[in-house]
Amino acid sequence: MRDLEFDQQHVWHPYASMREPGPVHEVVAAEGVWLQLADGVRMIDAMSSWWAAAHGHRHPRLVAAMQKQLQHLPHVMFGGLTHAPAVGLARRLVGMLPPGLDRVFYSDSGSVAVEVALKMALQAQLGLGQGGRMHFASARGGYYGDTWKAMSLCDPVTGMHSQFGAALQVQHFVPRPPIPFGAEWDEDPARNGLGAVEALFAKKAYEIAAFIVEPVVQGAGGMWFYHPRWLSGLRTLCDRHGVLLILDEIATGFGRTGTLLALERAGVVPDILCLGKALTGGMMSFAVTVASRRVAEAIADGPAPVLMHGPTFMGNPLACSVACASLDLLAEGHWQAQVAEIGAGLRQGLAPVRDLPAVQDVRVLGAIGVIEMRQPLDMARVHAFCRESGVWLRPFGRLLYCMPPFVCGPDEVARICAAMVRIAGWQE
């Protein structure tokens, strides 16, 4: 049985049916911005393999870091043991993050990093004598991963996890931040969205441990770019009502939005920060949850003075080593010009579809480009066209979007835009 045939019969793919799984492309190699298929066709990875491969595939410095570490210590349990790659990565993270965020917890995926953040918030509130705060709040339109607690905070109506219904714990939601990124800020809380947060906290703060949100860019929940002032207002309200603030920068971190971290645009420091995806340059699944000293000490003062989490592959040396190399690449600063150039190319290249009747909106921020259609896209048709156009795109619902690797040049960005413009024109 051929690999593709066996795959279709036995291998589950993300958000796919085993009865009608849909077609897949078989990738045999990847380098730079290119994916090579088994039949020799090449496609630009316009998705950075779901935000992760920021430096492109198989960057030689990332490969070298992994190969070097592989010769000495591929893995060791983190309970009661430590190693130089884990300590070195923590040093880099503490050095790049805002002052006060300096307690680093390693895990193996973004969803788990969110679960850890939620546990941290609950245990911290217990340590602060706020044992009644057992729930969480978020903005509609968010996405925090596919694990159970994270799912409960994704959009409860339009999100991909809505079918789980009452099986998920009920959380508190406010409308998504209404003012777009780049628009003029409105000081009226009734119009800028902060009034809804204030109203929620006035009634329910006593039972809310933390508010979690993706800063500036809501990712898989709708690719919505919102005004940074909403974040700074949220920070003020959380402080006023004793609610901890968790920022999920798993998708937005490490330069993707045009600043190293999206939170920089608002000048906001959270109590807990989640990072992942591009942390290792797309080489390995890895994530971190970083807490403030106040949160860590509150947990230590609680009924269970240790954080109740410990993944088997926590602090994996291979992942830590390649993450250090990835952060070293970012520290050199080339990403800033690269992201700016990609953003300019996306604005120019996607502009032709802005006035099409079938297109609801076109938006670009950093190295993220989005065409929001009025009707859902034909996924099967898009999938086939990717091979034809030599550009790998993976839309969902009405959203056709890209986040190219930072090493994409102008010609490659133009090719990505041409493919997206062509797809958007199908519904005319």
Image (cartoon, grey):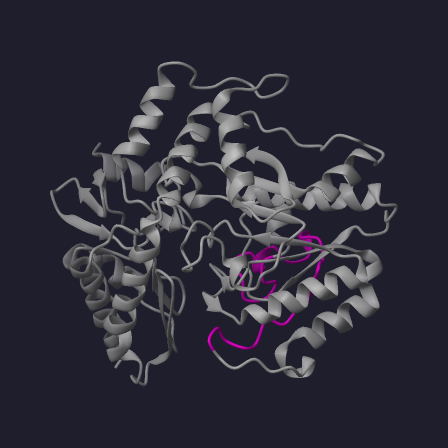
Provide the major secondary structure of the magenta segment. Answer: loop
Residue 245 image position (x, y, % from top left) = 68, 55
Q: Which residues are magenta?
A: 154-182
- Please tell me which residue lies in front, 181 or 158: 181
User: How many numbered callouts?
Assistant: 0
In-image side of 238 versus 56 (left or right): right
Q: Please report the residue visible at 26 percent of the width from the left and 57 percent of the height from the top.
A: 383
Residue 357 as seen in the image, left or right of residue 30: right
Q: Residue at x 52, y 19 (%)?
A: 83
Residue at 62 percent of width and 39 percent of height: 102
Residue 301 belongs to the span the image colors magenta: no
The reply to whether residue 316 is visible in this rendering is no
User: In percent of the image, x 38 and y 46: which residue is there?
Assistant: 52
Tell me the quadrant of the picture where the C terminus can be found: bottom left
- Residue 178 visible within the image: yes
Location of residue 300 (image quadrant) = top right
Question: Does the stretch in magenta take in 174?
Answer: yes
Quadrant in the picture for the N terminus: top left
Q: Position of residue 278 (x, y in %)?
A: 41, 45
Give the image location of residue 324, x and y in percent. Answer: 42, 33
